[in-house]
Amino acid sequence: MTSPRFDSVQVGDELPALHMAPVDRTTLALFAGASGDHNPIHIDIDVARRSGMPDVFAQGMLGMAWVGRLITNWAPQTQLRRFDVRFQGITHLGNAMHCSGRVVEKLEHNGESCVRIEVQSTNQYGQTKIAGDAIVALPDRH
Amino acid sequence: MIDKKWIGHELPASVLPIERSRLQFFAKAIGETNPVYTDPDAARAAGYSDLPAPPTFLFAAELDSGASFQLLDDLQIPIAKLLHGEQSFTYIRPACVGDTVTVNSTVSDIYDKKNGALEFVVKTSRATNQRQELVAELRTVLVCRH
């Protein structure tokens, strides 16, 4: 894949958004196995209810992985320097997450030309579940 | 209240071999369609030695080893009260299939807000490869809500 170039990227540029299908139980079960997070609160409704939740809900790291896809769809992962998020709310079954990102700063970071991207993951009701930012190094013009 | 004596506690090292079928399973689980993460030839064409671990994958090390759940037991945080508050990664170099990553973590802070209604545990981690090269640094904030 080709990377955006530092000179051609402007503050305010939007990354191509990522639209996820609504969260279902299969997604949670597959992610439990693949991620190693076997916490039953995400896959066993009986445990979720005993814990005071109405149903199982998404692993936070599943949502972060989707935001990671947003970033690596835009620039190769070898150029990703930092990735920081805050989990702001629980992602429930049926939530269809929309991952978006916007360039907010062009900066030099450890001697490299980089951009800072604000990222978020928001459901179909406009509730933001994850917010954070990433630092991505971009090649200069030759 | 979580005992602050745990500040400075070092978790046992967690060793995570980066395996191709696991990465392909992870890619499927997150809906990844970029062939760099599923097809070794595409990964090599992109300059990797084999499939790379995607940006959040290394979090698996302490889940696989059980160190994450052992920490909750030690700190007496019930899973029902646990939330993942924040997660950060700083990337130094890729980890690819064939690498073995070791994660070493320390409980770097414990504090509370709202008169103890929310307690926070900060864990900082270093992930190194089989050549003792730094791969990534992680910072995790766990929240216990009362």
Image (tube, coloured by chain):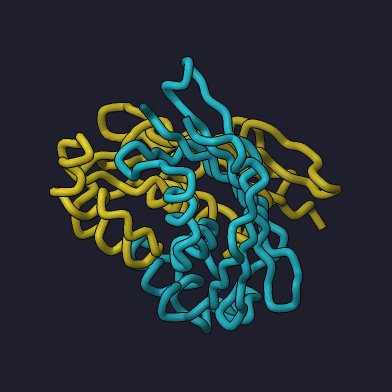
Chain colours: A yellow, B cyan
Q: Hey, which quadrant is residue A107 in on the image? A: top right
> In this orientation, which residue lies closer to the viewer: B53 or A105?
B53
- Using the image, determine if residue A44 lies above or below residue B111: below
Asked if residue B43 lies left or right of residue A138, the reply is left
Of all residues, the one furthest to the right in this rendering is A111
Which of the image's four quarters has the C terminus of chain A? bottom right
What residue is at 41 percent from the left and 41 percent from the top?
B77
Residue A4 in sight in this render: no
Q: Position of residue A125 (x, y in %)?
A: 26, 28
Q: Position of residue B130 (x, y in %)?
A: 69, 78
Q: Position of residue B19 (x, y in %)?
A: 49, 79
Asked if residue B33 lies left or right of residue B80, the reply is right
Asked if residue B69 lies left or right of residue A93, the reply is right
Residue B31 in sight in this render: yes
- Using the image, determine if residue A70 lies above or below residue B47: above
> In this orientation, which residue lies closer to the viewer: B139 or A89?
B139
Which of the image's four quarters has the N terminus of chain A? bottom right
